[in-house]
């Protein structure tokens, strides 16, 4: 799999938006500053993410981006595919012309690896990645997963869920 800067930036930025949109839309300038990413590149990525229905934007003072769905419903594969990142480790791009216009000896191996990677990325949501990130830092997210545990969390953080919206709202 050739996961390029585009896919990495998109996943990182979507995680940042999921984590910081509890109090309203998140500006890309804030994401760029927190994650040390290029603002102009983020603008290009978020145009693609918006076209694929993963984020919603709002204009004006206090405007920015929010996830269009709950972060538990957005997979890492959704984000990567929205920014046109193929999950393919074959040299031929799956065209079976890897060895002078014929199938190479290892073609099926690389096809299977590509499928495994696609399955893995499809099985991980933004919430899954954020939970793991926060747990590794000793922060327990304020999410249902930890309800009923015998020990209270040391510190909690809320992962923002996309607000429910009535059908037909023409928000840009």
Image (spheres, rainbow, N blue to C red):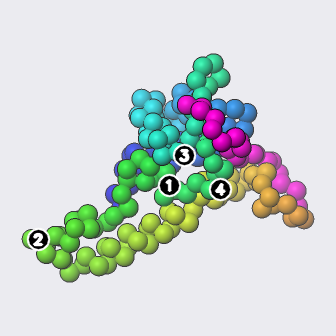
Q: Residue at x 66, y 50 (%)?
A: 70
Tell me residue 132's x, y (percent): 64, 58
Q: Is residue 166 magenta?
A: yes
Tell whether label 2 touches label 3 (CB within 8 Å): no
Contact between marks 2 and 1 (CB within 8 A): the answer is: no
Whole-number angstrom distance, CA of label 4 to CA of label 3: 12 Å
In-image side of 50 versus 63 (left or right):
left
Furthest residue toward left: 100
Residue with the mark numbered 3: 54
Tag 1 near tag 3, CB within 8 Å? yes
Q: Earlier in the sequence, mark 3 or mark 2?
A: 3
- N-terminal-most mark, 1 or 4: 4
Gap in angstroms between the C-alphas marked 2 and 1: 32 Å
- Which label belongs to residue 30? none
Q: Quadrant of residue 135?
A: bottom right
Name the foreground residue: 21 vs 149: 21
Q: Are marks 2 and 4 in contact (CB under 8 Å)?
A: no
In the rendered image, residue 130, in percent from the top left (x then y), is placed at 64, 53
The 10 Å Cα crowd at callout 4, few under 14, some 14 to 19, many 20 or more, is some
**Which is nearer the N-term, disc 1 or disc 3?**
3
Q: Please indicate whether residue 148 sits to the left or right of residue 33 in the image.
A: right
Which label was assigned to residue 101? 2
Q: Earlier in the sequence, mark 2 or mark 4?
A: 4
Of labels 4 and 3, the one closer to you: 3
Residue beneath label 1, please?
78
The picture places residue 72, in percent across and down from the top left corner, at 65, 56
Q: Are marks 4 and 3 in contact (CB under 8 Å)?
A: no
Give the quarter of the image for residue 93. bottom left
Q: Let me know if residue 162 is in the magenta part.
A: yes
Residue at x 20%, y 72% (from the top left corner): 96
| Quadrant that contains the N terminus | bottom left
Residue farthest toward the front in the current orientation of the protein: 168
């Amino acid at each position: 799999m050739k996961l390029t800067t585009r896919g990495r930036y998109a996943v990182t930025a979507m995680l940042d938006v999921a984590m910081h949109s509890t109090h309203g839309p998140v500006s890309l300038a804030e994401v760029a500053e927190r994650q040390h990413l290029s603002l102009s590149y983020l603008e290009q990525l978020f145009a693609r993410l918006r076209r694929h229905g993963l984020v919603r934007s709002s204009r004006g003072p206090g405007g920015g981006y929010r996830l269009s769905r709950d972060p538990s419903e957005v997979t890492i594969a959704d984000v990567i595919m929205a920014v046109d990142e193929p999950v393919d480790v074959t040299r031929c791009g799956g065209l079976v012309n890897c060895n002078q216009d014929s199938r190479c000896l290892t073609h099926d191996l690389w096809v299977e690896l590509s499928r495994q990677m696609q399955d893995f990325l499809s099985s991980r949501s933004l919430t899954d990645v954020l939970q793991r990130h926060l747990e590794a830092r000793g922060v327990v997210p304020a999410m249902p997963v930890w309800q009923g545990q015998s020990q209270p969390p040391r510190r909690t953080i809320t992962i923002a869920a996309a607000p429910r919206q009535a059908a037909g709202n023409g928000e840009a």
